[in-house]
């Protein structure tokens, strides 16, 4: 563990005896067949049982970065197409 922020602590959600402290650790995940490592990733770690919870905002950002659509232009829809009758200005007749 590289560095830690000791300012904030929360009770451990796993053992209820320890305190969760924020640390910056190396996060590992698989993307297909490739192992991805992310250094200095924020996580909350219990000082008693070692339970880890990764920072939700950081996980969201990482998910966006690792998304298969990352870097691709966003297609903009032009709204809902309007159905037109055969003759301009007339409503479709009921059967």
Image (cartoon, grey):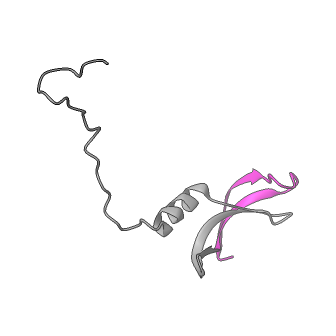
Image-based side of 43 in relation to 75, left or right: right
Looking at the figure, which quarter contains the C terminus?
top left
Would you identify the image quadrant in which residue 49 lies?
bottom right
| Residue at the (20%, 31%) spot, across then down | 84
Height in image: 53 above or below 2?
above
Which quarter of the image is occupied by the N terminus?
bottom right
Image x and y of residue 68, in percent: 46, 68
Q: x%, y% of residue 32?
A: 58, 76
Q: Which x, y percent locates residue 26?
A: 63, 76
Q: What residue appears at the point 32 percent right and 58 percent down from the top-left corner?
A: 74
Q: Nearer the viewer, residue 28 or 3?
A: 28
Q: Position of residue 87 (x, y in %)?
A: 13, 27
Judging depth in this view, the residue of 11 and 33 nearest the camera is 33
56 lies above or below 62: above
In the image, is residue 84 above or below residue 68? above
In the image, is residue 75 part of the stretch drawn in magenta?
no
Q: Is residue 10 magenta?
A: yes
Q: Residue at x 29, y 47 (%)?
A: 77
Q: Which residues are magenta?
A: 1-28
* Residue 59: quadrant of the picture: bottom right
């Amino acid at each position: 563990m590289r560095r830690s922020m000791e300012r904030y602590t929360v009770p451990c959600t796993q053992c209820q005896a320890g305190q969760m402290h924020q640390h910056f650790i190396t996060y590992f995940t698989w993307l297909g067949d490739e192992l991805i490592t992310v250094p200095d990733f924020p996580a909350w770690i219990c000082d008693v049982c070692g339970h880890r919870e990764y920072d939700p905002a950081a996980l969201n950002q990482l998910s966006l970065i690792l998304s298969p659509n990352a870097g691709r232009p966003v297609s903009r829809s032009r709204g809902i197409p309007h159905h037109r009758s055969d003759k301009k200005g007339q409503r479709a007749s009921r059967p």
